[in-house]
């Protein structure tokens, strides 16, 4: 049995290393492949706030395999179909947004894991099962062991119920959404405000005490460095469209200097 990309990523986290990847909003398999070839650890494909369809997702996941990069999918909701379809198509991990209770976390595990951990709908001929080219026993065992589950804490209710969420077996990563967190605190968009930072620190401390990993979205390297020092290991750095826009801006600035 070879080590899968998501198992490799989990190994890095277990070794105490930080991992990095961007949010993906553009429908471009080529871009995903390039990101993987660049050496990033994962991509986080956003089905909550992007136009990516299920059909397009499957090709994006193929590109992630080609680029040797772990593919996480942020699903749009908590329904069984929201969770099941990306997993069947081959997602290495899921990020589930707006989780604010232990009951919600239990529901996510129930839909994401095969028995005895849950009751994920079973399709042993799906793309994630290599269309039946690996044995049923191996597929079921690997799917439960290697699929990474992250739940996103985005508001004060989730923070207040964090002990209940952390008590649920099967959740690997507590993921912090700083922008939605800032909004819940009445200071929308002010992600560097000390009130937001204090809540992030609170989440990190509680999560690490329970032996789980912490993830967060950041806009820049400086913020990433600050949160890595705090103990955050799963860093989502910027967004594909922003990275491309910044690269275009830099090229235009350089071109204007040599053409005038």
Image (cartoon, rainbow, N blue to C red):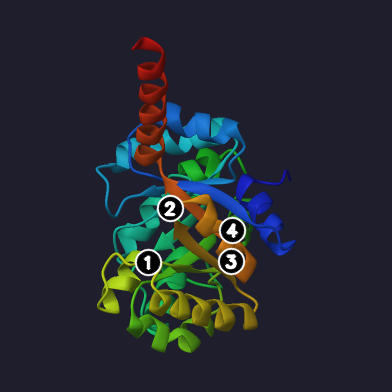
Horizontal side of 92 relative to 137 (left or right) equals: left
Place of residue 176 in the rendered image (x, y in percent of width and height, measured from the top left)? 44, 68
Q: Nearer the viewer, residue 5 or 226?
A: 226
Q: Which residue is mark 1?
A: 191
Give the CA distance from mark 2 to mark 1: 10 Å
**Image quarter of residue 183:** bottom left
Badge 4: few (under 14), some or many (20 or more) residues near its Cα, within 10 Å?
Answer: few
Q: Nearer the viewer, residue 34 or 190?
A: 190
Give the CA distance from mark 3 to mark 2: 15 Å
Which residue does the image show at 29% across and 58% down from the upper left? 76
Which residue does the image show at 42% across and 52% down from the upper left? 73
Q: Secondary structure at mark 3?
A: loop
Q: Which residue is mark 4?
A: 225
Place of residue 213 in the rendered image (x, y in percent of width and height, measured from the top left)? 59, 69
Place of residue 21 in the rendered image (x, y in percent of width and height, measured from the top left)? 52, 47
Q: Does residue 119 lie above or below 220 as drawn?
A: below
Q: Which residue is mark 3?
A: 232
Q: Which residue is mark 2?
A: 219
Going from N to C along the chain, the mark reached first, 4 or 2, is 2
**Image quarter of residue 256:** top left
Which residue does the image show at 58% across and 81% down from the upper left? 205
Q: Secondary structure at mark 1?
A: loop
- Contact (CB < 8 A) between labels 4 and 3? no
**Residue 44 in view here:** no
Which residue does the image show at 51% across and 36% down from the upper left? 64
Q: Identify the image quadrant of the C terminus.
A: top left
Going from N to C along the chain, the mark reached first, 3 or 2, is 2
Residue furthest to the front: 260
Horizontal side of 151 relative to 146 (left or right) equals: left
Give the CA distance from mark 4 to mark 2: 11 Å
Mark 4 against mark 3, which lies toward the viewer? 4
């Amino acid at each position: 049995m070879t080590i899968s990309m998501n198992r490799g990523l989990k190994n890095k986290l277990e070794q105490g290393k930080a991992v990095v990847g961007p949010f993906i909003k553009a429908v471009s398999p080529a871009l995903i492949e390039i990101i993987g070839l660049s050496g990033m650890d994962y991509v986080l494909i956003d089905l909550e706030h992007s136009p990516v369809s299920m059909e397009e997702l499957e090709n994006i996941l193929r590109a992630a395999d080609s680029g040797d990069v772990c593919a996480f999918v942020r699903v749009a909701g908590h329904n069984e179909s929201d969770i099941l379809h990306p997993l069947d198509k081959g997602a290495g991990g899921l990020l589930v947004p707006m989780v604010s209770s232990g009951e919600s976390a239990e529901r996510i595990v129930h839909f994401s894991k095969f028995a005895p951990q849950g009751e994920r709908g079973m399709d042993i001929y799906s793309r994630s099962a290599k269309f039946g080219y690996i044995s049923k026993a191996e597929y079921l065992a690997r799917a439960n062991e290697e699929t990474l589950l992250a739940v996103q804490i985005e508001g004060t209710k989730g923070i207040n119920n964090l002990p209940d969420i952390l008590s649920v077996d099967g959740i690997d990563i507590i993921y912090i959404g700083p922008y939605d967190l800032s909004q819940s605190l009445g200071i929308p968009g002010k992600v560097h405000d000390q009130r937001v930072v204090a809540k992030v620190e609170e989440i990190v401390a509680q999560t690490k005490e329970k032996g789980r990993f912490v993830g967060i979205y950041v806009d820049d390297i400086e913020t990433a460095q600050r949160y890595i020092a705090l103990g955050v290991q799963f860093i989502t750095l910027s967004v594909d469209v922003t990275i491309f826009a910044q690269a275009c801006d830099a090229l235009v600035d350089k071109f204007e200097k040599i053409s005038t």
